[in-house]
Amino acid sequence: MEKIFNNTQVAFALKSDTELDRAYFLFKMISNEPLVRIGTAVTNFALKAHLPVDGLIRATVFDHFCGGVNEVDCLSVVDRMFTKGVSSVLDYSVEGKEEEEQFDAALEMTLKTVEFAKERDAIPFAVFKPTGLGRLDLYEKVGGKEALSATEEIEWQKVRDRFDLICKTAHQKDVALLIDAEESWMQDAADDLVEDMMRKYNTEKVIVFNTLQMYRWDRMAYLKELHERAKTAGFFIGMKLVRGAYMEKENARAEERGYPTPICASKQATDDNYNTALDYMMKHLDRMAIFAGTHNEESSYRLMDMQRTSGIAKDDHRIWYGQLYGMSDNISYNLANHGYNVAKYLPFGPVRDVMPYLIRRAEENTSVAGQTSRELNLLKIERDRRKIK
């Protein structure tokens, strides 16, 4: 198969020389693990101390990885990317909230992004995080089959109602909806909720997508079991496949509490697990739709090759490739240039509220072997091609 991901002219066509320089500088910083740790600590201190650092953050890491501070702010980025065939998923990336009014605000924002997606071809999906609609501790308690207090029962029903309202609205407006995965200890409750939504709203085609984190060794078994239930009950399965973003936290918690880690034993085992899920879903496209969320070139080529050998059109509506904004432009824009369905996750939200997301992005780029060096190398090639000094 032709190797298309080295074409930096296509990958960075939307970046000015100044933006290219900023990206190169940023990934240089991220490549230094001690610097990332120090920068994270300093940033957290500055935010907690209410120091005026929003402007500095916005001019550097925020504008590289985020679309804006609100949904309207994102539209210029959405429109620019769509000129190159790359769609957007508006992702309200405010995390770690605990209050009911904050969950209701996230609900309203998600409903607004569903409406945005309905109105714009450039935004084919809406998305939300389960903990945007309810407390992580509550998900954990429900997933662990612990008894809930009367107050918690009411609280959990509100979470269910928020899920249902978003999924019902997406179904009514015919907008595909991605539901993110989070920590393993809250995921069972989220999985059960999402399956309920699939049973209700995926009866004719896929509207609701769950997310499988394939760095978990148990996810293939879960997918196969879900598939059997879907065949029996007559609903369709949408899955976003990712490797996962909470590895250090997962391993540390497992060690601290003395249970086996849910994470695969090695990077290779994770890659194999991811590719096995791709293979399985491609064999069952009659009942499944795939959103392949990956920055891995090998997995992307694998899916492209399966589409080719199976005679499935590049733009088949059941297969999407997805990457995060600010990362792996060589994959996103070259795929789109060759006619594949591609969508970038475009995070947005107030600068201070989005910082947990941005810190995780920096840490992920530091911990994933080869990711940052690959980004740097491609940026260097394009700078050399443009002869930027």
Image (cartoon, rainbow, N blue to C red):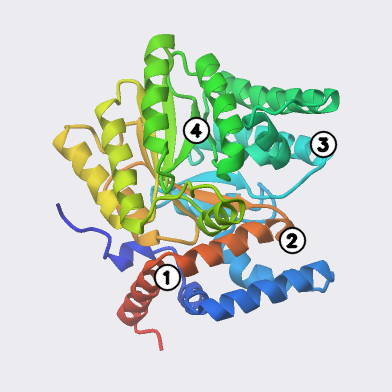
Quadrant where the C terminus sits is bottom left
In this figure, which residue is indicated by the disc labeled 3? Answer: 100
Marks 2 and 1 sit apart, C-alpha to C-alpha, by 25 Å
Q: Earlier in the sequence, mark 1 or mark 3?
A: 3
The amino acid type found where label 2 is placed reads: Arg
Residue pictured at 54% horizontal, 30% vertical: 191
Instruction: Tell me if residue 128 can be seen.
Output: no
Callout 4 crowding tier (Cα within 10 Å): few <14, some 14–19, many ≥20: many
The amino acid type found where label 1 is placed reads: Thr
Q: Nearer the viewer, mark 4 or mark 2?
A: 4
In this figure, which residue is indicated by the disc labeled 1? Answer: 372
Q: Position of residue 70 (x, y in %)?
A: 69, 50
Residue 157 location, quadrant: top right
Q: Position of residue 50 (x, y in %)?
A: 84, 69
In this figure, which residue is indicated by the disc labeled 2? Answer: 352
* Left or right of residue 305: residue 64: right
Q: Secondary structure at mark 4?
A: strand
Q: Secondary structure at mark 3?
A: helix
Which one is nearer the viewer's eye here, 196 or 308?
196
Marks 4 and 2 sit apart, C-alpha to C-alpha, by 28 Å
Q: Earlier in the sequence, mark 2 or mark 1?
A: 2
The amino acid type found where label 4 is placed reads: Asn
Residue pictured at 36% horizontal, 69% vertical: 370
Q: Position of residue 251 (x, y in %)?
A: 52, 56
Q: Is residue 117 above or below residue 374?
A: above
The amino acid type found where label 3 is placed reads: Glu
Residue 160 location, quadrant: top right
